[in-house]
């Protein structure tokens, strides 16, 4: 994701956007600028910007637009992810371990889905909180620990697995082999 201002020193945002598109860069671009004229907006979109937000802006709306951009530009993803005998179905929001249905709360599934999307990569507590609890700004990060602990009790412990690892100083990781 790239957030560009139209009025930058040297190359302006339109030029930067046009250059990125000319070299084949498909990274989502949002123009964030004080220029609110319809021709400015049209130029931004014509040069390859994916969205345009004028100042002053609402932070809540900006974040929602950024999330929407990511959703629209994300490559098509497989609906079902397998990690050893752990199955995470992102479309139906269901989880199975060793062919047994595992009942998860909405937030527990959201944490698991994020870890599944980033398998074998550590995901920080603050990143998990930002994705799963995006509407709560003063969230105590211990709530992430509580949800990860609950996930371990549901998807790992009863099956003698340890698929969710703690990565010291980095967060949590779902092992690609399922543990």
Image (tube, rainbow, N blue to C red):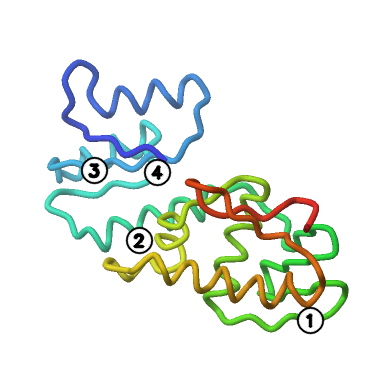
Identify the element where label 4 is drawn.
loop
**Mark 2 highlights which residue?**
64
**Mark 1 highlights which residue?**
101
Residue 1 as seen in the image, left or right of residue 102? left
At a point 67% along the width and 67% down the height, the residue shown is 90
Q: Nearer the viewer, mark 1 or mark 4?
A: 1
Residue 44 as seen in the image, left or right of residue 78? left
**Mark 3 highlights which residue?**
32
Q: CA distance from mark 1 to mark 4?
A: 40 Å
> Is disc 1 in contact with disc 3, using a CB cutoff of under 8 Å?
no
At a point 28% along the width and 66% down the height, the residue shown is 137
Viewer-nearest residue: 144 or 33: 144
Q: Quadrant of residue 7?
A: top left
Identify the element where label 2 is drawn.
helix
Q: CA distance from mark 2 to mark 3?
A: 14 Å
Quadrant where the C terminus is found in the figure: bottom right
At a point 37% along the width and 52% down the height, the residue shown is 66
């Amino acid at each position: 994701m790239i957030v560009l201002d139209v009025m930058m020193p040297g190359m302006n945002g339109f030029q930067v956007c046009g250059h990125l598109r000319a070299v084949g860069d498909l990274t989502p671009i949002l123009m964030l600028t004080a220029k609110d004229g319809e021709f400015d907006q049209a130029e931004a979109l014509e040069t390859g910007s994916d969205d345009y937000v004028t100042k002053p802006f609402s932070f809540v709306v900006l974040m929602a637009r950024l999330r929407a951009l990511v959703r629209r530009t994300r490559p098509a993803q497989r609906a079902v992810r397998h990690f050893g005998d752990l199955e995470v179905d992102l479309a139906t929001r269901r989880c199975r371990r060793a062919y047994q249905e595992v009942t998860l709360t909405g937030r527990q599934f959201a944490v698991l889905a994020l870890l599944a999307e980033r398998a074998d990569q550590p995901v920080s507590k603050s990143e998990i909180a930002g994705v799963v609890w995006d509407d709560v700004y003063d969230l105590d990060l211990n709530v992430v620990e509580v949800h990860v602990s609950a996930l371990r009790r549901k998807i790992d412990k009863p099956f003698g697995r340890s698929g969710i690892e703690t990565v010291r100083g980095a967060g949590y990781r779902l092992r690609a082999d399922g543990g």
